[in-house]
Image: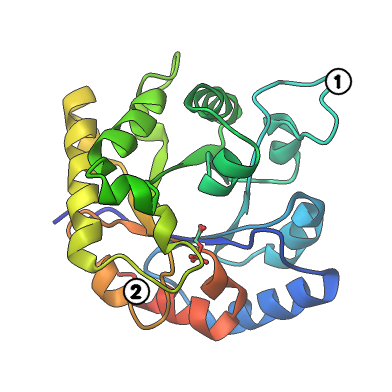
Amino acid sequence: MTTKTKLIAGNWKMNGSLAGNAALIEILREHIGRPASEVVVCVPAPYLQQVQGLLAGSPIDLGAQDVSAEPQGAFTGEHSAAMLKDFGVRYVIVGHSERRKYHRETDEEVAAKTAAALSHGITPIVCVGETLQQRDAGRTAEVVKRQLAAVIHVNGHCISEIVVAYEPIWAIGTGQTAAPEQAQAVHALLRAQLHHAASEHAAGIRILYGGSMNATNAADLLAQPDIDGGLIGGASLVAPNFLQIIAAAR
Ligand code: PGA
């Protein structure tokens, strides 16, 4: 069992509005108290400035959902790590399965984005995970290990600077959570891979679980020895549910 501080990260995805964000953060601030874990909300880029203001003086950090691998220039629609830094972003999700799927992000691009975030002092939350088809074909280990291998040796940076999120694609937004033991088995594989690459840091690297984590199943998942937090989509949009998950993380 590791004793590192857990990380509870909300992934709002493409949800929110000025009024809705204000209402959500107000309830979170009112009830969060002093959480035992680190808490971050990864918001859509247009709301970074608003949510930065809403979170000021609270224990909740600001996060983003994507970052360009490029520093600046003619990349319409993209935003750079330096821009995220301007708004006090501490964490950025990189390589989410929805980006790998809808934007065809490759392992190489995920590695380049990871490097861009790290070079600006932003902690990347690097997502890995298999499809149902890959799981059924017995390829889970091969897929997640390949995805993790791509970010283990980012030039000039130490693997201890990243957060890993295991998100089985079949569990995302489906209500079908991985059983705690099922998730733990993959987390243990990832931990072993980290240990092999950097034995002195492996125990301290946080590996989050994501995929239909909710107020009911969070405690069991978070009790697993290699589950160091959660990346939460749907349940992070409902203040009482997100608060219950935060309370379950100790
Ligand atoms: P979910 O999403 O909690 O809605 O399943 C998790 C994620 O995609 O990060």
Residue 201 lies in what quarter of the image? top left
Q: Classify residue 139 as left or right of residue 73.
A: left
**The quadrant where residue 76 appears:** top right
**Quarter of the image that includes the C terminus:** bottom left
Query: Which amino acid type corresponds to the residue marked 1 in the rendered image?
Result: Ala
Quarter containing the N terminus: bottom left
Give the residue at the far top of this rendering. Answer: 155
Badge 2 is on which residue? Answer: 218
- The residue where tag 1 is placed is 74
Whether residue 248 sits left or right of residue 45 in the image: it is: left
SS for tag 2?
helix
Seen at 53% across and 45% down, the residue is 96
Name the one closer to the observer, 174 or 17. 174
The answer to whether mark 1 is within 8 Å of ligand 1 is no
Which residue is outermost to the left? Answer: 1
Disc 1 on helix, strand or loop?
A: loop
- Lower position in the chain sequence, tag 2 or tag 1: 1
Residue 3 point in image, percent of width and height: 21, 56
Name the foreground residue: 176 vs 223: 176
Query: Type of residue at label 2?
Result: Ala
Picture coordinates of residue 35, whole percent (x, y): 43, 71
User: Going 25% across and 68% down the picture, which residue do you hit?
Assistant: 179
Q: Looking at the image, is 96 positioned above or below residue 182? A: above
Q: Is residue 177 above or below residue 66?
A: below
- Residue 228 visible in the picture: yes
Residue 77 position, x and y percent, is: 83, 36
